[in-house]
Image (tube, grey):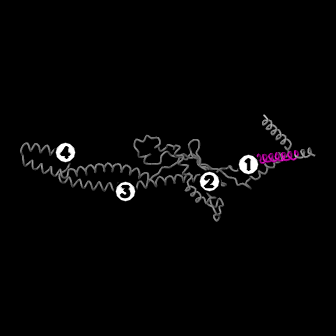
Amino acid sequence: MAKQKTTERSGFHILLLLFKYWKLLVFIGLISAVVAFVFSTPLFIKPKYKSSVIMFSTSSNAVSQLILAEGNYNEFLDVTQFGDDAHIEQMIQILNSREIKDHIIEKYNLVEHYNIDTNKKYWKTKLYKYVKNNVQFSRTDNLAVEITVMDTDPQLAADIANEIADYYDILKRQIIQQRSIEAFNILEEEMKLTDALVMSLTDSLSRIMSHGVYDYESQSERLMQQYAIELAKGNTVAVKRIKDELVVLEKYGPIYVSVRDRLFYLKEAQKLFQEKYQNTRVDASYSLPQKFVVEKAVPADKKSYPNKMLIVIVTTVCVLSLTVFLLIFQENIKRGFQDIGKQIRKKE
């Protein structure tokens, strides 16, 4: 209860103080507003203009999957499908890369534009800080990515925003095609080795077949049946001939089966390699756009910074708050001295 009364008393004293010094506060407020307005003019703060690009990520990057895949009913492999959250985060990560910053710094000579003295220490840190403050990337509520560029030159702001969007496409393609080319080269080497091995096994199979081994399983079954028949007839000449054939079949048959089976699996691998080779070659040679631009940047005709009204309001409120604090402090000091004087007079 006592605490509540103390709080009410303090609030009442502040109201009395405001009423007592209202003229001073109005004067200081007006002076603060005028000063803030003057210092927010282009004479002291260079105005900045904002330009933005809004774009969507694509759902897939592999051209072969989008174009060559049969029975493609997956919506995420649709060439017109927008990307999901993962694709958006990936896009923002690439946009924030050092390579994109270096590209716009070099193309638009931002070192000179930002008046960076390259002879000073840490000039690169200062340069990248300027770029980071003036170029922002954010996701919208509709799963798009917005590139926002602020600059004192409205045309330059629009050019940088559009260039970042275009260079994102180039950089993303380079990343994808670099991996596709490496995969293509590996696959090409594997195909060459497989083709050479198939040719070697085919040649070996031809030499085995020249000894009369054409189909080990059916030949051995047929010869054994014929051998039993001729043996029952007592045809010794035919039995001897069949025995000779069985000796040849016994010698080359297992080799024939081994080479034949290995050749079969290698030819199956050849088919798979050929399909992947075609897909990888397409991915390494061609690339679809990696984004959907729905709004290109245009030069702004109205500045976005500084906001004079906001500067005037914030400055005035801060100055008045500080003034009220100083007045309260002054009144407390004055009241303290008065209390000390009363105590001294009582003792006398």
Q: Earlier in the sequence, mark 2 or mark 4?
A: 2
Q: Which mark is residue 311?
A: 1
Helix or strand or loop: what does disc 4 sit on? helix
Give the residues in magenta. Answer: 310-339
As shown in the figure, which amino acid type bears the numbered disc 3?
Glu
* Secondary structure beneath label 1: helix
Of the image marks 1 and 3, the number of the one nearer the N terminus: 3
- Which one is earlier in the sequence, the residue at label 3 or at label 2? 2
- Mark 3 highlights which residue? 189
**Do labels 2 and 1 touch, CB within 8 Å?**
no
Which residue is painted at 26% across and 54% down in the image? 201
> Which residue is rendered at x = 60% and y = 54% of the image?
160
Mark 4 or 3, nearer chain start? 3
Out of 323 and 205, give the one closest to the viewer.
Answer: 323
Q: In the image, is 247 to the left or to the right of 15?
A: left
Horizontal placement of 198 versus 220: left or right?
right
Query: CA separation, marks 1 and 3?
Result: 67 Å
Quickly name the residue at label 4. 218
The disc labelled 1 sits on which kind of residue?
Ile
